Image (cartoon, helix red, strand yellow):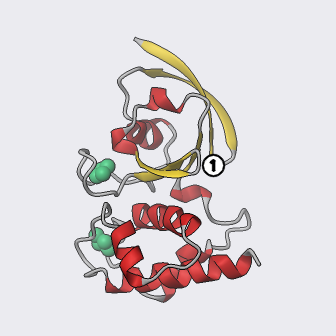
Amino acid sequence: MSVSISFKINGEQKVSEIRENTLLVDFIRDSLKLTGTHIGCDTAQCGACTVHMNGKAVKSCNVLAAQVDDADIVTIEGIASTDGEMHPMQEAFRSHHGLQCGFCTPGMIMSALDLAGRNSSLDEATIREGLEGNLCRCTGYHNIVAAVKSGALNMSKNTK
Ligand code: FES
Ligand code: FES
């Protein structure tokens, strides 16, 4: 059965007809063509598919697209400024070498933004705990933690 949903994605209001059993991650990638959101496990374990739904990080392989009716969704494509300048968290991942293959990176950054939004000061233990739902096969996490710490600091400076 198909259902109609009205939602905002990266600031743009949209209406779509979807099958009621479509996963949000498949809808984002296949219908909306926003392929920065990755699928690593499809079972809510790796965090590669993390997006924001109404301001909170969610694993989009664990959400039905039908659930985003009236919701505000942000994907990795929606966080840079409109002139193309990277978000401070993206810039921090770049400058701290917080990625290698990059597969986990969109999900890491979306989770890091949620974490930074909920904590004014982030120490290493808080970052490691906050990102435990996001897996990286390449980096050993050290540079990711450094990137998130720096990105969160720069975000807090930008809001002062
Ligand atoms: S693809 Fe969603 S958590 Fe791995
Ligand atoms: S950079 Fe390759 S999985 Fe994280």
Which quadrant is the C terminus positioned in? bottom right
Percent position of residue 25, x then y:
40, 42
Out of 5 and 121, give the one closest to the viewer.
Answer: 121
Residue 29 vertical position relative to residue 64 in the rendered view, above or below: below
- In percent of the image, x 28 and y 48: which residue is there? 44
Q: Give the quarter of the image for residue 119.
A: bottom right
Percent position of residue 52, x then y:
52, 51
Q: Is residue 132 left or right of residue 51?
A: left
Q: Is residue 129 left or right of residue 149?
A: left
Q: Residues within 10 Å of mark 1 (few under 14, many from 20)?
A: some
- In percent of the image, x 40 and y 68: which residue is there? 105
- In percent of the image, x 69 and y 36: which residue is there? 13
Residue on which the image places disc 1: 10
Judged from the image, the secondary structure of the residue bearing numbered disc 1 is: loop
Out of 127 and 36, give the one closest to the viewer.
Answer: 127
Residue 156 vertical position relative to residue 34 in the rendered view, above or below: below
The amino acid sitting under disc 1 is: Asn
Residue that extends furthest to the top in the rendered view of this protein = 1
Percent position of residue 91, x then y:
56, 80
